[in-house]
Amino acid sequence: MIPKSVRKARIGEKFNVFDFELSTGGVAIGTLDSGTCAFFDHRDSKIVKRLGELARK
């Protein structure tokens, strides 16, 4: 990443991206996967065909 700033203090802020800590009390990432897609069913052949057609345009 190349900082897009001219102020020395701001450039330093941009490089300080690891100034946080994850806690064990937060949301468990493993519980976020519901096993389904929120947009469309990847197993639906009609949708897959339509997406393929759109991709070729």
Image (cartoon, rainbow, N blue to C red):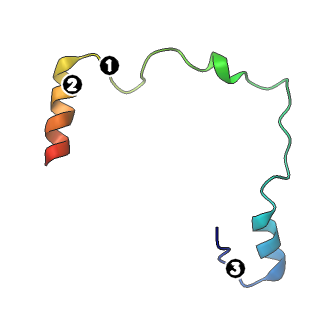
Q: Which quadrant holds residue 50?
A: top left
Q: Are dots 2 and 3 in contact, CB under 8 Å?
A: no
Residue with the most extreme bottom position: 6
Secondary element at tag 2 = helix
Q: Position of residue 20 (x, y in %)?
A: 84, 47
Q: Which residue is mark 2?
A: 47
Q: Which residue: 21% across, 34% down? A: 51
Q: Which residue is mark 1?
A: 41
Q: Which residue: 85% across, 25% down? A: 24
Find the distance from the CA under tag 2 to the CA under tag 3. 45 Å
Find the distance from the CA under tag 1 to the CA under tag 3. 44 Å
- First in sequence, mark 1 or 3: give its number: 3
Is 40 left, or right, of 55 in this rendering? right
Q: Establish if 39 lies above or below 20.
A: above
Q: Which quadrant holds residue 40?
A: top left
Q: Which residue is mark 3?
A: 5
Amino acid tagged 3: Ser
